[in-house]
């Protein structure tokens, strides 16, 4: 895997169903006007992990893995903006195995290259995302930045981190900064658009570490002393939306829609600073990264607590179903990268993720 980096929008939809938005405040308003903490349990039946697959008895590839996801999400509105924190544990099935398996069902013995059958437990990914905004209306104590559907403009900063327990020992950390533009939608809705600069400044890959048995021991040419790659800073655009289905009859107003998307620009060679192998080299070991799209175009949420206990308990228990799509996962070129192909031009289908998934979120 080129990155174990799970961006803010990989989990931001866990909080996308909060029907709240930052507004200009006065000195009499409490320092925190909204505090919302949730636990979410969800299930992704057809997730993917670049380079990880198994072969079925008929010779075809099984390129997907089911994942259980356990998440804690915090969201608050304070006097000068908002804060968002998400920590998630992704637990995969056996098709995406933890160490010591190097791929599904096998252990490759470093040095000898021999393969030993194995039945390893599924990998665990731990990811964390944090975002904070500082609203211009709040900072300057004005309503100048509320014009028509534009609700506010904010400074936004963020941090992402992740770690995994498989043989590749992938781990990453990233920082981002930019602006967020917040617009109103009908029925208490909103859409946020944030153009950002982002930099993955730590990106570890165990397979690239010198002495690991998988890379020839030529430091800086075919392996890295510490296994840490160096990516170029790049651009990103993050957006998310929420809207109640307020046009429904009063007796059915328990539903809302939300979604999110993130575009991240190319970050240079996937194994930088190792030498870049340009095309037409067959199955290049160090191809260029490519713009990735990580999205959840739509999530339909049923406000179960409101339906059962009334409006005073709105969004205490949400049940939802969504669609998830991730192209060029972790920035890997799904047409070229060695992790994404089994031979030049033949995809292993692990660098594009397309899956329905569902879950339940509980406020506490």
Image (spheres, helix red, strand yellow):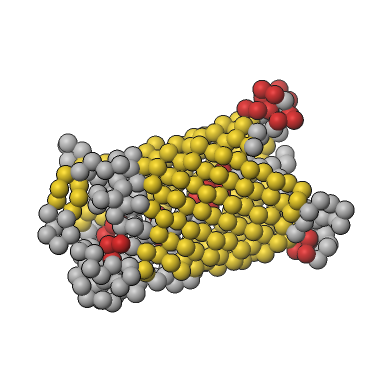
Which quarter of the figure is the C terminus placed in?
A: top right
Q: Is residue 173 visible?
A: yes
The residue depicted at 46 percent of the width and 69 percent of the height is: 201
* Image location (x, y in percent) of residue 8: 53, 54
* 351 horizontally vs 311: left or right: left
The residue depicted at 17 percent of the width and 41 percent of the height is: 59
* 186 horizontally vs 5: left or right: right
* Residue 117 against residue 198 in the figure, above or below: above
* Image location (x, y in percent) of residue 167: 29, 54
* Residue 132 against residue 191 in the figure, above or below: below
* 184 horizontally vs 323: left or right: right
Foreground residue among 226 and 247 = 226
Outermost residue on the right side: it is: 28
* Image location (x, y in percent) of residue 177: 59, 66
The residue depicted at 45 percent of the width and 50 percent of the height is: 126
Which quarter of the figure is the N terminus placed in?
A: bottom left
Q: Quadrant of residue 57?
A: top left
* Image location (x, y in percent) of residue 289: 38, 65
Q: Quadrant of residue 83?
A: bottom right
Q: Quadrant of residue 278?
A: bottom left
Total number of numbered discs in the rendering: 0
Q: Is residue 356 visible?
A: no
């Amino acid at each position: 895997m080129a990155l174990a980096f799970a961006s803010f929008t990989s989990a931001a939809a866990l909080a996308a169903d909060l029907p709240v938005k930052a507004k200009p405040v006065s000195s009499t308003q409490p320092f925190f006007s909204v505090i919302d903490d949730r636990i979410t349990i969800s299930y992704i039946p057809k997730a993917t992990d670049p380079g990880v697959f198994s072969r079925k008895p008929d010779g075809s590839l099984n390129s997907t893995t089911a994942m259980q996801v356990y998440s804690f999400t915090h969201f608050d509105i304070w006097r000068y903006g908002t804060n968002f924190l998400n920590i998630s544990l992704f637990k995969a099935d056996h098709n995406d195995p933890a160490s010591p398996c190097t791929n599904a069902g096998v252990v490759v013995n470093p040095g000898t290259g021999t393969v030993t059958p194995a039945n390893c437990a599924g990998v665990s990914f731990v990811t964390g995302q944090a975002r904070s905004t500082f609203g211009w209306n709040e900072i300057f104590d004005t309503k100048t930045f509320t014009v028509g559907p534009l609700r506010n403009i904010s400074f936004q900063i963020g941090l992402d981190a992740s770690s995994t327990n498989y043989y590749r020992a992938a781990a990453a950390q990233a920082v981002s900064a930019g602006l967020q533009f917040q617009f109103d939608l009908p029925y208490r809705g909103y859409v946020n658009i944030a153009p950002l600069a982002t930099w993955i400044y730590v990106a570890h890959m165990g397979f690239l570490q010198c002495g690991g048995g998988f890379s020839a021991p030529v430091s800086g040419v075919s392996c890295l002393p510490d296994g840490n790659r160096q990516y170029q800073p790049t651009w990103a655009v993050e957006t998310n939306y929420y809207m109640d289905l307020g046009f429904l009859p009063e007796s059915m107003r328990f539903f809302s829609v939300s979604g999110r998307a993130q575009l991240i620009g190319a970050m240079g060679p996937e194994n930088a600073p190792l030498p870049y192998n340009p095309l037409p080299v067959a199955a290049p070991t160090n191809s260029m990264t490519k713009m990735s799209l990580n999205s959840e175009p739509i999530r339909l949420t049923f406000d179960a607590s409101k339906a059962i206990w009334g409006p005073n308990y709105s969004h205490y228990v949400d049940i939802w179903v969504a669609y998830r799509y991730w192209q060029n996962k972790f920035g890997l070129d799904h047409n070229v990268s060695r992790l994404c192909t089994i031979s030049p031009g033949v995809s292993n289908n692990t660098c594009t993720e397309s899956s329905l998934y569902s879950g339940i979120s509980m406020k506490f």
